[in-house]
Image (spheres, rainbow, N blue to C red):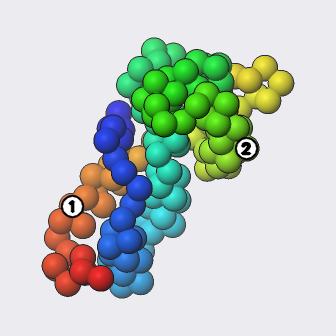
């Protein structure tokens, strides 16, 4: 299970560290997969959708309305209409292109597929970030 609750947007320093790690090829065999994973998790609405399926929903399918309701409760500064708009035009297509979900625009059903190695990649990345010298974190 991927625990994304409370995660914020990547900071500029974190992004610089990740780019530095990528450029120094400290994990060349995993760089493309890790980069796609971080890109997918970069936005809080995508993380909320993943959180919903990983921690709330007992099945791997839900309607757009169910997901929207969950996100609107957790992100009160966004009204339901804006959540639907952003999910359907931006975040569901991104998650679908990266293989995390299938979205049927006709029925408005979302099938969650997840990511087989997300948890292990995030754990590895956390270890790598914690082992970086302080200078890599300063901007």
x, y percentage for residue 109? 69, 22
Q: Give the CA distance from mark 1 to mark 2.
A: 34 Å
Please give the label number shown on residue 33. none
In the picture of the structure, the residue carrying the numbered disc 1 is 127
Q: Secondary structure at mark 2?
A: helix
From this view, report whether residue 8 is shown above or below residue 102.
Answer: below
Q: Is 81 in front, or is 46?
A: 81
Q: Residue at x 57, y 40 (%)?
A: 100
- Name the front one of labels 1 and 2: 2
In the picture of the structure, the residue carrying the numbered disc 2 is 89
x, y percentage for residue 87? 64, 38
Q: Residue at x 32, y 73 (%)?
A: 13
Outermost residue toward the right? 106
Q: Is 65 in front, or is 21?
A: 65
From this view, report whether residue 112 is shown above or below residue 30.
Answer: above
Describe residue 139's horizontal placement relative to residue 73 as left or right: left
Q: Residue at x 16, y 79 (%)?
A: 134
In the rendered image, which quarter contains the N terminus?
top left
């Amino acid at each position: 299970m991927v625990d994304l609750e409370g995660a914020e947007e990547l900071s500029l320093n974190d992004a610089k560290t990740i780019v530095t790690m990528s450029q120094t090829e400290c994990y060349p065999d995993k760089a493309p997969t890790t980069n796609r994973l971080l890109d997918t998790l970069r936005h809080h609405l995508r993380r909320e959708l993943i959180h919903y399926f990983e921690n709330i929903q007992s099945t791997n399918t839900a309607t757009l309305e169910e997901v929207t309701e969950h996100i609107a409760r957790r992100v009160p500064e966004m009204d339901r209409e804006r959540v639907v708009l952003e999910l359907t035009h931006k975040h569901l297509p991104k998650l679908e292109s990266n293989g995390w979900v299938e979205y049927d625009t006709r029925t408005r059903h979302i099938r969650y597929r997840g990511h087989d190695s997300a948890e292990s990649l995030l754990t590895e990345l956390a270890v790598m970030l914690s082992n970086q010298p302080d200078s890599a974190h300063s901007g």
